[in-house]
Structure formats: C-alpha cells, structure tokens
Image (cartoon, rainbow, N blue to C red):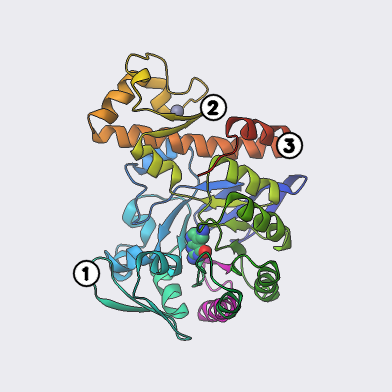
Amino acid sequence: MANIGDFSILATDGAARTGVLHTAHGVVQTPIFMPVGTVGSVKAIAPDDLEDIGAEIILGNTYHLYLRPGDDLVARRGGLHEFNAWRKPILTDSGGFQVFSLNELRKIEEEGVTFRSHLDGSKHLFTPEKVVSIQRNLNSDIMMVLDECVPYGADKAYTARSLELTTRWARRCRDAYPQGSAGNLLFAITQGGFFKDLRERSIAQLTGMADFDGFALGGLSVGESKPEMMEMLYHCAPLLPAEKPRYLMGVGTPLDIINGINAGIDMFDCVLPTRNARNGTLYTSVGKVNIKRQEYAEDDGPLDPNCSCYTCRTFSRAYLRHLFQAKEILSFRLNSIHNLTYFLDTVRGARKAIAEGTFASYMKQYEEIYPQEVV
Ligand code: PRF
Ligand code: ZN
C-alpha cells in the first residue's frame, strides 16, 4: 500500500526519469505537465474537457483564491476540489511569485510580504504560516512554501540575502504544518538567481531539511536568455534529491519541458498552452501554427493530423481560423483543448520514451521541430 507522498521511480534513461507520485486525490504519473487554473478554473476549459485531455493534476494560485473568493469561503464549500468539481490532484503556488509579479508596492520583511490587492487596493500580509493556512483551506494536494522569486538582474548580495530569507520562510512553512499531519504535501522552492554558488547554497539548505515532500527550482524563466536558463537548469536539477519529485516552476515551451525532463525534472506548469491558445498560436507536430493566417482560410484539413484531441478530430483549420477571426468564445475552448493535449502528449511521449530507453531520439525530434526557439 502506497502512502500519500510516496514517489516511485519506474524507469530512468540518462538523467530523465519516469515515476508515480501518490497524492490524497490519486496518483500523478511523471514527468507531468500541469495546466494552470489560476482562479480555480483552467481558462475556457471545464473539468470534463480536462479529463478527456488526460490532465492528471492542475495548478491553482493561493494569491488569487485568497483575494477572491477567499480561502475561507472555499473551505466552507469543502475545499477547492469540491468547489470547482475537479476531483483529481491540485497543486497550489504559494502566492509569493504572484505578489512579486502583480504588485509594485509590496514590502518584504522577515515576517512576510505586505502587498496591495490588484483587485481593490486593499492591504494584506502573507507570512509563511498564512500561506500554509490558505493552502490547507483550499485543501491543495501539493502546497508550495512562501519564497521570494528574485528578479532577473538582481545583484549577488541581494540574491544571497533573499535566498536565506526563502530558506527561513520554508522552515516556518514546514513548522506550521509538520510532514504527515494530514494529506497535504509541501514542496520547498530553491532560489539563488543566476549565481551557481548561491543556487548550490539554497539547494543545500533546503534539502538539508529532509522533511519536504518535493523540491522546486524557482526563479528561472524570469527574463534571462535561453542559454542562461539552460545552464542553471542543467547545473541545479541533479543537485535536487533523486528520490523526491523535482518541479521546474513556470516553465515552459515544449522544448524547455523536454530539456527539463532531460535534466531530471518531473513536474512542469506554464500558462503558455492556454494563453497562446487564446492568441491563436497553436502547437503542432510540425511546429507552431498561427491560425489567423490567410493561408488557412480554406484549409479543410485538421489542425494537426497527428493529434487525436477533440478539436483535431472534429474541425477544420478553416473553421478554427473563422472562429478566431470572429472572436467567438468557442475558439478559446477548442484551441485550449488542442494546446493542452499537445503539452500532455509531450510528457506522455517522454514517459514512454524513458521507459523504452529512447529518450535521446525523442528529444531530438523536439529540437528539430523547434530550432533556436526564442520564447
Ligand atoms: N516561485 C514561485 N512560483 C513561481 C516561480 C517562483 O520562482 C516561478 C519562476 N519561473 C514561476 N512560478 N513561488
Ligand atoms: Zn489537437
């Protein structure tokens, strides 16, 4: 019998691994991509669509759900799974990152971070204890610690002070909810900016506290160049404990995800598939397609003949283009179904390739589809 938090690695291929993580709402196969449902809903997508796509876990945001509708209100509805009718695993980000990206007037102190709501300007304080309590109210399967995502370009002295604070906050999060208290897992977030020695220090401090259920790499994909991100990713991923799930936060493109898997990462989330779906940028087996282009106006073929999603099984490129041009809300849904399927197919294909020992050639296909990718 597996316990909540158990993570078993089933196969490895180089540094890449495939495994199974047990949560209170079922298992997650890794590597996995987590669709982003900021306010509890994956934009334009209903839970039955998510089921059809084969999503296994979605992400919600502490920051947004705390401000609206309020974590107490969600708790009174039985938690986020009962509230949004997604009964499979949910990971919640801690709010740290959202406070830093959505608030210019935030103030960071030892106690926590003070910020103003982007909705009504009201003032709030997130402490490590508070974000754990919010995530417990949401009944998140995987809670994240409060961290400071250091802005790109921060100097070494600032980054060093910040990572120490992130470590102290992580300890306070864990102390507020000791491991195994109930069914909510807690992951630590390593930081350290773009300084390898600081990254190593952050990882050593956090992995030295053995009582986290997983470890994340934070502070990447924050404005750095692709080579800078890759260098840090490949340097840090192998330093995270091999026996626990490793999560690369907020990353990324299909090729980034493939690189993450190649470096030994197990979990990913990004708004890219859903946000790009709403912009008409669609990922296919031959690369990115901009569905608004004139060349698709009378194209009766499927968006991607190699995709078996509802959108590709049912509609032509001509119709998808028309929906997009007419700004029909169905366009959001159909495009999101396809892009999420593409990202989930990417990780499903990776799992299969790792199990079969063919991950290197699987990766090569992505390098060919997305050469010198910038965004
Ligand atoms: N910290 C948290 N959430 C995040 C990040 C981080 O560093 C990132 C960085 N790409 C995305 N989401 N808490
Ligand atoms: Zn499709």
- Residue 340 horizontal/vertical position (percent): 45, 39
- Residue 179: name its quadrant: bottom right
- Residue 195 horizontal/vertical position (percent): 65, 68
Residue that appears at 39% across and 69% down: 99
Farthest residue, direction bottom: 110
User: Contact, CB < 8 Å: mark 3 with mark 1?
Assistant: no
Q: Earlier in the sequence, mark 2 or mark 3?
A: 2
Which residue is under mark 3? Answer: 360
Relative placement, left or right, of 304 versus 84 is: right
Q: Nearer the viewer, residue 228 or 144?
A: 228
Which amino acid is tagged 2?
Ser
- Residue 312 horizontal/vertical position (percent): 42, 24
Which residue is under mark 2? Answer: 285
Q: Does the stretch in magenta take in 38? A: no
- Residue 365 horizontal/vertical position (percent): 65, 30
Instruction: Give the CA distance from mark 2 to mark 3.
Output: 17 Å
Instruction: In the rendered structure, find residue 120 and report the number of the disc placed on it.
Output: 1
Look at the image and give the residue range highlighted in magenta: 163-189
